[in-house]
Image: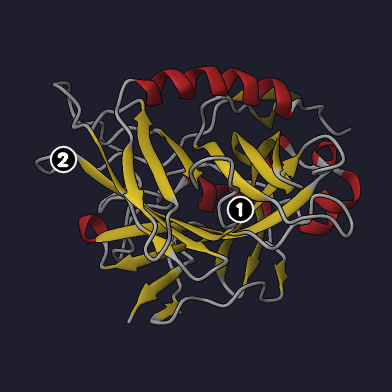
Amino acid sequence: MRLSFSSTRSARRLRTVGLAALASIGTWVSPVNGSADSVEFAARFTPDRLGASTTILVRFAVSAGGDAVPSPVREFSLRLPHGMGFGSTTLGLAVCSPSTLETFGLGACSPNSFMGFGRAEIEASVGATPIREPIDISTLMAPATDGHTAIDFYATGSKPLLAGLVFPGLLLAQGGPGSRAHIDLDMFIPPVAAWPGGPETAIAELESSFGPAGLTYYRHRHGRTVPYRPSGPTVPVSCPRGGFAVTGTFVFEDGTTAAPTAHVPCPVGGPVAKSPYRNDCAAGAVESPVEQGRRSEGLVVPSRGPRTQLREGYRPFQGCSHFDRGSKKV
């Protein structure tokens, strides 16, 4: 029997937490190169404690000025700070395929495949008047793509603007092990018409999470189904002067780009939370709970064909946890 799951309720609860957390810091405004558009960008960790499991909160808003609709975002890449740990996370113990989402919706996906929630405002021009519609976004673990950790973003809204679409994403690792490594979370947004034959839509605002806040996973223990909260990525064990740098890179349909950087404040006081699991691919490191669970249950993650072109200068690598199967800079 499949457990029921309400993504909308969890998204609303997380939205309240996320808005409060993001409101406590400023936003960074960046002009779009070669365009009159501008991007506001903010990021936050909650909780923000060195070495602790956390949820990453991100918000951005794209504006064109006046009543104009901005050029649609085609790719959004979130670069996390050096040393952000993914070796001990238990997010994404199950996968949900794009075909399942497109055919049956969120209700057909395991709760253990959810990795975050969010909301967005999409915009389209109808004559001289832009129209907006709010949509809910769910982030789920997807089948691996050529050895890379794949993520799907499922967007749902009311008709006519958006009934339910799947946007692909990838987790890509770059740099050396441990504190020298960082992770890129990429989202690829295909052209979406407001309705068949209608104007193209553009994301005007987006708020989203990646982490355990608002999530409930389930496991079987002694014949019972037990709920629990998964662990998320870990905050680096040291904070540079000026805070943790989180960069959002935007590629627009008209070829213009923007790359604002937000700085998450360093935690004030408190001990460093230590984990027995590895945050890098050092030889002899302890297996993460994800690896142990997948190995003990004989779980094989199905692979789907390539969905996107990897950015130039990246190659796949065999990591030591399901989040390390990204790509490494050469």
Is residue 321 at all visible to an observer of this figure? Answer: no
Q: Amino acid at mark 1?
A: Arg
Image point (31%, 62%), residue name: 284
Indicate which label's residue lies in the foreground, 2 or 1.
2
Q: Amino acid at mark 2?
A: Cys
What x and y, as percent, mark residue 289? 49, 44
**Quadrant occupied by the N terminus:** top right
Is residue 95 at all visible to an observer of this figure? Answer: yes
Q: Secondary structure at mark 2?
A: loop
- The residue carrying pointer 2 sits among few (fewer than 14), some (14 to 19) or many (20 or more) residues within 10 Å by Cα, namely some
Q: Secondary structure at mark 1?
A: helix
Q: Nearer the viewer, residue 148 or 160?
A: 160
What x and y, as percent, mark residue 109? 78, 42
Would you say 314 lies left or right of 285 here?
A: right
Residue beneath label 1, please?
294
Image point (12%, 44%), residue name: 240
Image point (39%, 66%), residue name: 34
Where 117 falls versus 25 (above or below)? below
**Quadrant occupied by the C terminus:** bottom left
Q: Earlier in the sequence, mark 2 or mark 1?
A: 2
What x and y, as percent, mark residue 195? 86, 51
Residue beneath label 2, please?
239
